Amino acid sequence: MPYNWTSDTASPDSTAPRELHLWPHQSLPPEGYVKFLAVTAVLIVIPLFPLLGSFVLWGILPFLLVALFGMKWALDRSRRDRQILEVLTIGPEEARLERTGPRGGHQSWHCNRYWTTVQLHPHEGPVPNYVTLRGGGREVEIGAFLSEDERKALFDDLQRALRP
């Protein structure tokens, strides 16, 4: 699951702050990225062997290189856009959510823990089972990039964690 608690949820010391780290699922690990581009390059080169030494090769080669580098650019862009980290810190008196976006943008929200509520919006949000935290006069989303089932599990985890 693309989120985890950094401290034990069943800790006997309930005053210790707990952190929840959330990140988007990365379907293509770095090793898979390299292998995919290498296999694609090999599959592009194999049909070019009969064209070695001909002028046709020079006519086709720029388009194949543009296709290969376009694929690399798209994969890199997708990876950069998925570089999101949300950190929810639940202390004895305060709940704080810090979000670092894909382009380095930073957003912060904090509220008295006693007034913090977790809400699940089954149909009203931009995604099904949209999870929000409300408190301090604001309502903020958390884990919108998770799958529908993961958001349900997150909602249950947050309700347990924020209980007095």
Image (cartoon, rainbow, N blue to C red):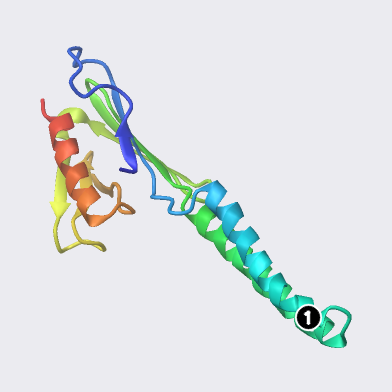
Vertical placement of residue 75 versus 22, above or below: below
Q: Is residue 27 above or below residue 42?
A: above
Quarter occupied by the C terminus: top left
Identify which residue is drawn at 46% across, 48% down: 101
Along the horizontal axis of the image, is 13 left or right of 163? Answer: right
Depth order, front residue of 14/74: 74
Residue at point 11% right, 29% down?
A: 163
Q: Image point 20% across, 12% down: which residue?
A: 13
Q: Locate residue 151 relative to residue 82 in the image: left or right.
A: left
Direction from residue 81 to residue 38 in the image, left or right = right
Where residue 129 appears, as percent x and y from the top left, is: 18, 56
Work out whether residue 127 or residue 5 is closer to the camera in this orientation and state it. Answer: 5
**What's the residue type where badge 1 is placed?**
Pro
Residue 83, compared with residue 40, is above or below; it is above
Q: Is residue 131 visible?
A: no
Rendering coords of residue 68 (x, y %):
66, 69
Residue linked to disc 1:
50
- Residue at image x 72%, y 71%? 45
